[in-house]
Image: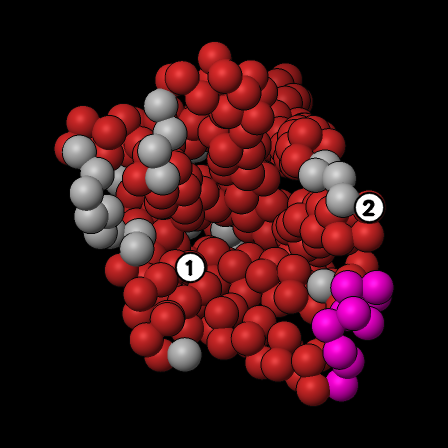
Amino acid sequence: MWTEMIAFLKSFFLYPGLKLEWMLIGIAVAVVFGALWLLAHWPPLFKKPWLWAVAVVSAFLTLLAVTFIQIPLQYWVGLALTNFWDQATIIEWLLLAGAPSVMISGLVQEGSKMVPMVVWWWRSGRNISPMMGLAIGAIAGAAFGILEAVWTNNSMFMAGWTLEALQTHGFVGIAGFWERFFVIGLHTSVSALAGYGLAKGKGWQFYLIAAGLHTLLNYGVVVRQYIYYMHGFDALVHVEVWVAVVSVLVSVWALLLRWGRTEEAEMEQVAETAAGEPPQSEPPQAEPRD
């Protein structure tokens, strides 16, 4: 298993045979996708440069967690299933048998993305504003989403994807890019929710919510496999629609919290000004110390 894990880790950085221009296109597409989702959150990346460090640490820490925690756990779960059930029974009960694997994915990835948030929470004396929690979470999630999208895009190019795939297969030809766009949105929004929950003193509750929503999105893969094995029908398009719907709904929730907090802060400023008090966007103790 160790060899497979190391090979998986290397695959994020090595693309043998892939031309440089295609590699750069894969990177550019992933960055643009991530930037679009982050623009909706408008985090203070340039006012607080340390947030760039959050992005880098979160992306690579999550990748390491996937490699050395998620993959072994999923392997052992699969091994346990094959020891108790034969292949035919596993397929028949796939909707149940596949659930632990996708749950592991959600728990591991959302937990590792929260590490930079938790570190800053402790450094700030366990006192960060909900706005900052949302910002840190959104950046942490988007960073890993971009890294994962670079890997997926370049893997598709290595497999021989060209513009002709779009002309020949229509939507199916760009399904990989469609999925990556919305998955980055999911990564961004669920991590933003986790950061918000941490700032509100409900860290573990929102961590489980984030992991559950991540699991909900990934469960579409299990459903697709079940339909294919049982009915011989590839539900790729249906699953991609599912990915988009879940990602958009979760993103709407996170963005409502993000911009709702902004409006609330502005109303507080107006009330304080009317009362003759100096306006402030947030309580002094809520601002994280650099």
Query: Which residue reaches farthest bottom?
Result: 83
Report x, y in % for residue 225.
Answer: 70, 51
Horizontal side of residue 144 vs 252, given as left or right? left
Kind of residue at badge 2:
His
Residue 110, located in which quarter of the rendered image? bottom right
Report x, y in % for residue 146.
Answer: 39, 39
Residue carrying label 2: 231
11 over 237 or under it: above or below? below
Kind of residue at badge 1:
Thr
Magenta segment: does it hold 236? Answer: no
Which one is earlier in the sequence, the residue at label 2 or at label 1?
1
Give neighbour class at mark 1: few <14, some 14-19, many 20+ (Cα, 10 Å).
many
Q: Identify which residue is drawn at 45% across, 43% down.
A: 145
Q: CA distance from mark 2 to mark 1?
A: 36 Å
199 over 78 or under it: above or below? above
Residue 212, located in which quarter of the rendered image? bottom right
Q: Secondary structure at mark 1?
A: helix
| Residues in magenta, as a range | 84-93
Q: How is the image coloured?
A: secondary structure
Q: Identify which residue is drawn at 52% across, 59% down.
A: 109
Q: Which mark is residue 62?
A: 1
Residues 77 and 200: in front is 77
